[in-house]
Every structure is written in C-alpha cells, then in structure tokens.
Amino acid sequence: MKVLAVIADLLREAAARRWFLALAIALTALLLLLLTSLRLEVVDGALAATRLFGEPMFHDIRPADVALRPVFQVASQVVFWGGLLFGVLACADFGPALLSPGRIEFLMALPVRRWELLLGTFLGVLVLAVGGALYAAGGLVLVLGGKTGVWTGWPLLSALLAALSFGAVYAAMLAMALWVRSAALSAATGMVVVGLGLLATHRRTLMAAMENGPGRALFAAVTALVPPLGRMAQVAGALASSAPLAPGSLLRLLLGTLAFTAAVLAVAGYRFERKDF
Amino acid sequence: MRRRWPWLVAAALLLGLAAWLLWTPDTLAPPRRPQVELPRHLRPAEVQRMQARLTPVPGLDAGPAAVGVERQDPLLAALSVGGGSSAVVLEVNALRYSPLGELLLQCLVAREGRENALESLRKAGIDPLQDVDRVGVTQNGVVVSGDFRKTQWEALLGDATPQAYGDRGTITQVAPRGEGGTTLYVTRWGNSLLHLGTSPDDARAVIDGLESRGPKNKPILTPEQTYGEMYGVISGSDLVQALGQSDGWGKALSDAASSVELHLDARHDVGMVADVSGDDAAKVTDLGKSLGGALAVGRLQARAEGDAETAELLDYARVVPGRDGKLSLELALPLEVVAKRLAFCRNPPDAGR
C-alpha cells in the first residue's frame, strides 16, 4: 500500500508537468486527425481503397488485417523509440526531485521504507510509460478497428513491451540519480543505456569486426548484460504486425530484461540504503 | 547499521541471470514465404527456350537479303489461326518434371489407367512424357508441339489416308468411332507440330498460317508472353461462356474483363499472375474490390478450417490495381493444397469398394 501511495504521489507530480500534458494533447490530436481524415473502404474483409484528407492513396487490395500490418509495425516503432526518447527526457527529473533537499527529509520522516520509496518511484514512472504506450497503441487500434473492423490486441502487447524496455532504461537513470542528483546526468545515463542496448543488438557482428584484446572483452562483457533494445523493438514490431516469433525466445528476452532491471534497481537500493540525508 | 551487502549480492546474481537469459540466438522466426516465384516476365531459361523455338517463316526466309529474317514460334502461329481471341498453352515438358505435373500424371493414370492412355500412345510411338513439348488449346482445336519423328501414324490414326497440303503439311480425316461422333481432322506440319480440329477449313488454315499464305493472323500470344508453366489469354466473351451464370467475383470478372492474361508457375508451390484488362475502368475497379474480398474470405475460411499454411500463403495474395482499366491478381498456393484438391482424381474410381 505504501508503494501505491508513492506511485500515486509521482503520478500527481507528473500530471502537474507540461511534458506529459503536451504528450497527451499531441497523441489525442494525432488520433483525432486520423479519425477524421482517414477513410478506409473495406469490401468483404479486404482493404479496397484508402483516402487521406480526401486524396486517394494507391495500394494493393489485400485482406484488411494484412494491409494494416505495416501500419501497426511502423506505429509500434514510433511508440517504442519515440516513447523511449520522450521517457528519457521527460522522466529524467523524477529521481533528482525525489532526492531534493526538504522533500527527501520529509519522505524519510514518513513511515515509508527506503526500498518502498525507490520501488514506488520506479513503478510510478513505469505506470506513466505503460499508460502513454497503451494510449497511443490502443487509440490507433480503436481508430483503425472502427474503420476496418479489424480488431487486434497485438499492438497493445507491443506497447507493453516498449514500456518494459523503457523500465530497464529508467532503472539505470534512477540508480544514477541516487549517486549524483542531476536530471541532466540521469538523462545522459538513459541515452547511454539506449546506445548500449543498440550495440548489444548487433553484438555479434560488431565483435566479429573487432580484434581480440581487452577492448573487445570489455565490449563483450558490457553488451552481454544490457538488454538488446534493437531486438526488443524488432520483437515489438513483429508482435504488432502478427509476425511469427521464435518459440521461447520472447520469454527469455522478457525475463532477461526484467532481470537486468531488477539488478540495476538492486544497485540503486544498495546506494539508497547507505545514503545519509 | 543496516546490512547492505545483500543488495549487491542480489544485483550480481540478477545480472548473471540477465546475461544468461539475454543470450538468445534469434528472436524472430524465419519468415515463411511460399516457395514460388510469381511469373511476371520471361526468366533467363525461358528467354533461351523462347529463342530456341523461333524458326524462320517458310517462304519468307529465302533470298539474299536475309537480314532481319522473320521468325515465328510455330505453335503460337498455329494457335492464332482462325481469328480466335483465347488460347491457353501448357508447357507439358516443364510441367511433367514439376511436383504439380507428378500430381496430374497420377490423376491421369488413376482415372484412365496407364494401359489405356499413356501406353496406347507409347505403342504408337509417342511418349507423351518425353516427346510432347507443349499443348495449346483454342476455340479452333488443340495444337501439340514436340518430336513426332518416331510416331507410327497408322497405328494412331487407323487406315485413314493423309492428304498432303502445302509444303510440309498433311491433313488426315479420321472418321468418328461411334455413332453421333465428330469427324476429326489431324493436321501434321513436319514432325514437330500437330493440330487436332473438327473443321477441314481450320486444318488448311493452320498450314497456310504456318507457311505464311493468305492474310496474316493477329497473334493471340507473342513469344514474349511464353513464361511460366502455363500461360494464355482468355477473352471476355470466352470468360462469360466459361463462368456461365456465376455470382460474386465470377460475375464481376465476366462483366468487367475484356481479356485476361494468365501465367502460372508450378516449379514447386503454385504461383499465378492474372492481368485483367477491361474497357470500363470503373467496372475493373469494382472487380478488383470483389477479387480482393474473395481472397480475404478464402483466407478466413482456410483459417477457420485450421489450414494455417494456406491462410499464411494467402497473406501474400493481392490485387494490384492498375490505371486505365487494368488490374493484376497475384496468388500463391502451396502444393499440398493443390494435392488435396486433386485427391479426388488420384484415387481410383472403385477405391473403397
């Protein structure tokens, strides 16, 4: 319950920020634009014609769900990478704000354990990420589903995957904020983790191009630990477009990302427990 | 003082677990696409095949100015005789060595019996599986090309006397075998072309056409259209006749199409491209929508019947709308589906009794 209270506190703080208000307005405007300007003609389940702003768009006539796959795939990538970058920038200040003089002392005086504060902050940000991703993906599913009759839940699952990936990035950002109370450094850490995640995606190719030595060993060690965010994005795209996944591999990827997130949060917990306020 | 080392131990263990879990070779399953190349143009082997089939037009290749000698594909020339507007050609030799050909052969053997059909022809010196190259069908008869040098025509056509016609042709009138039958006119041109028809005028016109006598026929199919294991052009009027009083996409097709050019690749799975042309662009547009709908319904049916492979392959089926009253239908079917459809004819008629 105390964790829930911390989450609610963080959400209240987020609601007061313009970043999230702007995101909500932008997403809503985009969805309304699609809703009013896109006309899709479906004949016996096939997407036969499309008009955007009244202009016909020429495309192959295919089953509507097949025709929408690329749309959902692109949308999933926008949600994944756009959400990741927006989250890094917009959430960088939550950790430092938690530790700001006055507020942290006040929180410490409450009957809340330190790990509950840490977990509540992390989960609060995760709720924001999940909410944003689900709002974007769910809105698109509703708009396109209403126009074509194609109802699919895969884009929502893809959005959850994007939020989970952001969770791994935010865990590192939060841990850094516990060492150095700086929003800029927290954001920079997020960007570094995103970069490392991209490198981890192409780990084998890059290692094959490297010569043996300490640099290669260090690269191998670091990229083995970081979730391969590029692969996560591919999986999110594949999920959104109903493409097949290798059996069992998605579960390992998810559990691996969760384990990384938990490990970084444990490091953050170590730091938080020994910090004097 | 609080113990803090468990946090670090937990972090180390979790990082190890993460490294182990994230070591996954591939997350995405390899894409399953039909093993079919949709026939859209002549492939290199087909260009060679097409060029090998072109022979100088008799009567036009003489003389010193032989530069730019006119050449023709005799089978295509024979198909164009009679002013027809539809012709379909089966590349028998290519089909024979394809999985689809095997299935069709099994059908033929099961229904006719090897002794009745294939062996009879073999006894007459024609091995349909070796000697026949192509079979073309038009409204005016059937044209067969191949190597008929070893054919014993007497054994095949009985004691009917062939009449010589033109430079290289003979026409044999074969009387009907039963009452109410039709007289068959078997036209041979050299040892490589055979025309089977029911009209003596058509028989003579075929040889005239091949030897460039009389008015030049407008080709139904050009050599550049001879790609795929089956190809052809079907006119709108013939489509109406073939499809009859059908509903749905069949009716839309016969209403809108003035001609359909068809190409089929059967080297493994079956791929088909049908280019539809129509005089009324709006009707062709509606046809595209009907065909797209039929594909979507077919895919849903396959999924409902648990045929995931067909449903997946129908994902790749599409209607490509063109401009000026044209559209293209592209479709791939797995061999297993075709085999299932042909199962009825591969089983002997008395099977199960």
Image (cartoon, coloured by chain):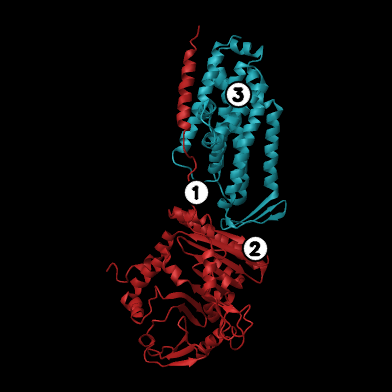
Secondary element at tag 1: loop
Which chain identifier belongs to the cyan chain? A
The crowd level at tag 3 (other Cα within 10 Å; few <14, some 14-19, many 20+) is many
Q: Pointers 3 and 2 in contact (CB under 8 A)? A: no
Q: Is residue B285 above or below residue B53?
A: above
> Which of the two marks, 3 or 1, is nearer to us in this view?
1
The reply to whether label 1 and label 2 mark residues of one chain is: yes
Q: Mark 2 points at which residue?
A: B322
Q: Which chain does the numbered disc 1 sit on? A: B
Kindly identify which residue carries mark 3.
A173
Q: In this view, does A17 lie to the left or right of B130?
A: right
Above or below residue A90? Residue B296 is: below
Q: Look at the image and tell me whether residue B231 can be seen.
A: no
Answer left or right for B301 relative to B120: right
Q: Are marks 3 and 1 on the same chain?
A: no
Marks 3, 2 in one chain: no
Chain B is shown in which shade?
A: red
| Residue B264, horizontal then vertical, whole percent | 51, 66
Q: Mark 3 lies on which chain?
A: A
Image position, residue B44 (x, y; %): 54, 64
Mark 1 Cα-neighbour bin, 10 Å: few <14, some 14–19, many ≥20: few
Residue A90: x percent and y percent? Answer: 67, 28
The residue under label 2 is which amino acid type? Gly
B113 vs B165, nearest the viewer: B165
Amino acid identity at mark 1: Pro
Mark 3: amino acid: Met
